[in-house]
Image: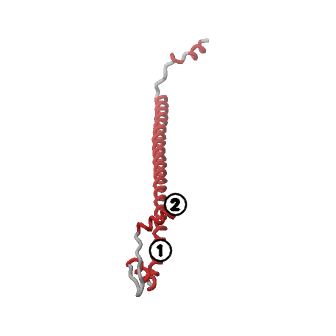
């Protein structure tokens, strides 16, 4: 029975302080210290990875926004290009017309009231033309 009582109360047992026990304790302390350092390194690594991924995601979102703005600008510029190309085509047609002497004569008669021999020019005021157009639309 005495042996059973001794096993039940391990607090009363003194530890032996020999070289072997001290070396075992040192090994255990080193092991625990390694575990602590490992956990610290893993924590630091996890933080670095999280910050890196956060930065990459933020950069990608910003690039998408910039890309959307650039795409809108591209659409606007393409629309302006179409308008300018139409205007250029009209000017090219007018340039071809200006090479024709008959067209120049007709334009000069219309704009500058020039006339050929035995020709009479009647000038109608612009206001009357506008009023006539308004009256025609009301009827």
Instruction: Report which quarter residue 106 is drawn in.
Output: bottom left
Which callout, 2 or 1, points to the residue nearer the camera? Answer: 2
- The quarter of the displayed image where residue 84 is located: bottom left
Closest to the observer: 104 or 98? 104
38 vs 66: above or below:
above
Residues at marks 2 and 1, CA–CA distance in whole angstroms: 34 Å
Q: Position of residue 28 (x, y in %)?
A: 49, 32
Q: Residue at x 47, y 61 (%)?
A: 76
Q: Nearer the viewer, residue 96 or 24?
A: 96
- Residue on which disc 2 sits: 138
User: In the image shown, does 29 or 49 lie closer to the viewer?
Assistant: 49
Q: Residue at (47%, 54%) from the top-left corner? A: 63
Total marks placed: 2
Residue 75: x, y in percent? Answer: 49, 61
Question: Percent x, y for residue 55?
Answer: 45, 48
* Dots 2, 1 in contact, CB < 8 A: no
The image's colouring method is secondary structure
Above or below: residue 106 compared with residue 136 = below
Q: Position of residue 138 (x, y in %)?
A: 52, 60
């Amino acid at each position: 029975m005495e042996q059973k009582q001794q096993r039940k109360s391990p607090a009363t047992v003194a530890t032996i302080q020999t070289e072997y026990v001290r070396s075992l304790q040192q090994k255990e302390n080193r092991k625990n210290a390694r575990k602590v350092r490992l956990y610290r390194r893993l924590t630091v690594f996890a933080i670095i990875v999280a910050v890196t991924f956060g930065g990459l995601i933020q950069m990608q979102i910003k690039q998408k926004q910039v890309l959307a703005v650039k795409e809108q600008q591209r659409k606007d510029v393409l629309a302006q290009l179409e308008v300018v190309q139409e205007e250029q085509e009209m000017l090219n047609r007018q340039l071809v017309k200006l090479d024709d002497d008959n067209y120049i004569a007709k334009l000069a008669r219309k704009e500058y009231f020039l006339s050929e021999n035995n020709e009479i020019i009647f000038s109608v005021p612009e206001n009357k033309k506008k009023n006539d157009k308004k009256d025609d639309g009301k009827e």
